Amino acid sequence: MKLLKATEASGAEYDSAAAEAYQKEVETRIAKLETESNQLTGKDNKKERSAKGKEIAELKNEHKYVDACKIVKGLEPKFGHFVTKAAVLPQIEKPETVQEAPEQKARKDNKKEKKEKESAGLSPDELKELESLKQQIIEEKAILKEQGMSGGQINKNEKIVSMVTRLNELKEKQDPGSSKKDKDAKKDAKKKTPLSAEEQKEYAQLQGDIEVYKAKLRTEFGYSNKEIKADPDLKEMEARLAAFEKRS
């Protein structure tokens, strides 16, 4: 088996001058829009002010602008703008695999299949027991509930625990690994995806932005508390904040 030595990737090249020029162009437009937005005071200009804010957000999130900012900072562009030469990745020869003779492979497959058939699955009696246990558990839980037991108490009942244990044993024999799959599924459902460093930064920034925006509505535009709560831009910001808080 022969492997080619991996060589270092040839770095990508970017048009830094064009990226910097584009960044300045967009930031000039953003600054102009922010100035115009700040001049739109009062309730009468609320709709137009909101439109300016959305236009600013669109400019800041534009893929070309994002790439320009990254290149100016010396980072790799995310969306492929301003790339003059793509990076060349090293080529590595895949190892040759030794093919088994068809007869040898067939014999192995037959043995494996036979072994799996012998070890997996339930006998007819066990299938009957499985179905019977399911019904017994339902009936027993109903009886215990009528006696005034709570759900937690029922699940801890000695007879219920014994039947459920046997039920799980039969299920595991019928479908090996099924018990682990169920546990993993429940575990995954409870998992929360933690915030990345970038999201944590955005979360902190958003908290400050909300407070500043509320103060601006109250002092500059004379909004009441009720009007502040109903402001669509504030609602949008608070919805994003709530999403972060669920994961923090």
Image: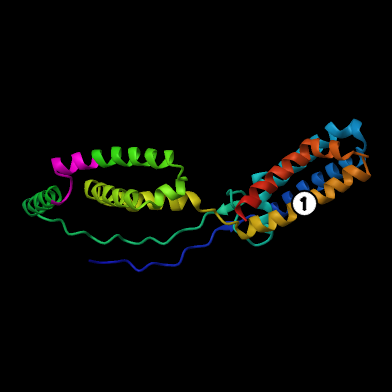
* Residue that label 1 marks: 24
Quarter of the image with the N terminus is bottom left
Residue 63 visible in the shown view = yes
Q: Amino acid at mark 1?
A: Lys
Residue sitting nearer the eye, 152 or 102: 152
Residue 132, quarter of picture: top left
Asked if residue 41 lies left or right of residue 8, the reply is: right
| Residue 119, image x, y percentages | 15, 52
What colour scheme does the image use? rainbow
Q: Magenta stretch containing residue 154, yes or no?
A: no
Query: Where in the figure is residue 174, as x and y percent of width and height?
Result: 22, 46
**Magenta span:** 119-130
Q: Residue at x 76, y 46 (%)?
A: 26
User: Would you say 29 lies left or right of 16 here?
Assistant: right
Q: Is residue 128 magenta?
A: yes
Residue 59 appears in view: no
- As displayed, is residue 133 above or below residue 207? above
Judging depth in this view, the residue of 15 and 167 nearest the camera is: 167
Percent across and percent down for residue 42 are: 93, 36
